[in-house]
Amino acid sequence: MAAPGNRRSAVVAACIMVAGSLAWIVGISASGLGGSRGFFGPGPLIADANLILEIFLVVGLSYGFLLARSGNIDAHRINQTTWVALNIGLIALLMAGSMQDVKLVRTADLADWRVGITWLHAAVGTLTAVMGLWIVLQMNDVLPRGLHVRGWKTLMRAAFAGYWLTAIFGGATYYFWYIA
């Protein structure tokens, strides 16, 4: 178990990282620069900022996996809570609203790669975000005991795989929207 001062410092750093990242996204949107040329070239700035944060997110969650494997459960809990909070914020600020660009009129619309991969990314990402949030709420003793999942290590592994799959689908979504 980490010393109280170390834990407090980790929580403060996590809050600053999440707040700063989300403020960056809000700032890009509020300034009207969201549609301007991004860092990587083909996509708009807001999409590139999201892509960068999503890459950090999956790397951060992977680091958290290593923390758990090494037995540093307190650091694992803080780390995973941080990244899940960032993910929920990005979903709320960016991804949920972007689904209006790929509204489904009929099932055949999914045959368009741009639409199909976006909906696949959204479906896997939503399920993964719900699993991640559930785990974080359980890990931090926010969920009532009656809602705790017994086989939660299996759920953690499934969520971890889901985050990686979502990241891959997110990269594919970026590709079909801005490169292909």
Image (spheres, helix red, strand yellow):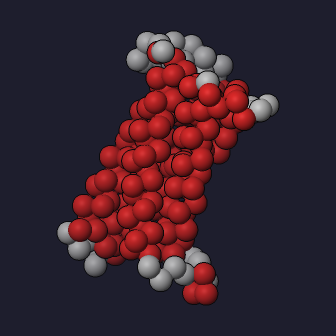
Closer to us: 79 or 132: 132
Q: Percent position (x, y) of residue 164? A: 39, 47
Residue found at x 61% / y 24%:
112
Q: Judge whether 6 appears above or below 48 on screen.
A: below
Would you place residue 35 above or below residue 121 in this image?
A: above
Task: Give the quadrant of residue 154.
Answer: bottom left
Residue at x 34%, y 50% (from the top left corner): 60
Q: Is residue 32 left or right of residue 73?
A: right
104, 44: nearer the viewer: 104
Q: Residue furthest right?
A: 105
Residue 9 left/right relative to 19: left
Q: Is residue 22 above or below residue 12?
A: above
At which x and y percent is residue 82?
A: 45, 57
Residue 31: which quarter of the image?
A: top right
Above or below: residue 72 compared with residue 122: below
Residue found at x 57% / y 76%: 142
Asked whether, in this view, residue 28 is left or right of residue 63, the answer is right
The residue drawn where x is 39% and y is 57% is 160
User: Which image quarter holds the N terminus?
Assistant: bottom left
x and y percentages locating residue 118 in the rendered image: 58, 34
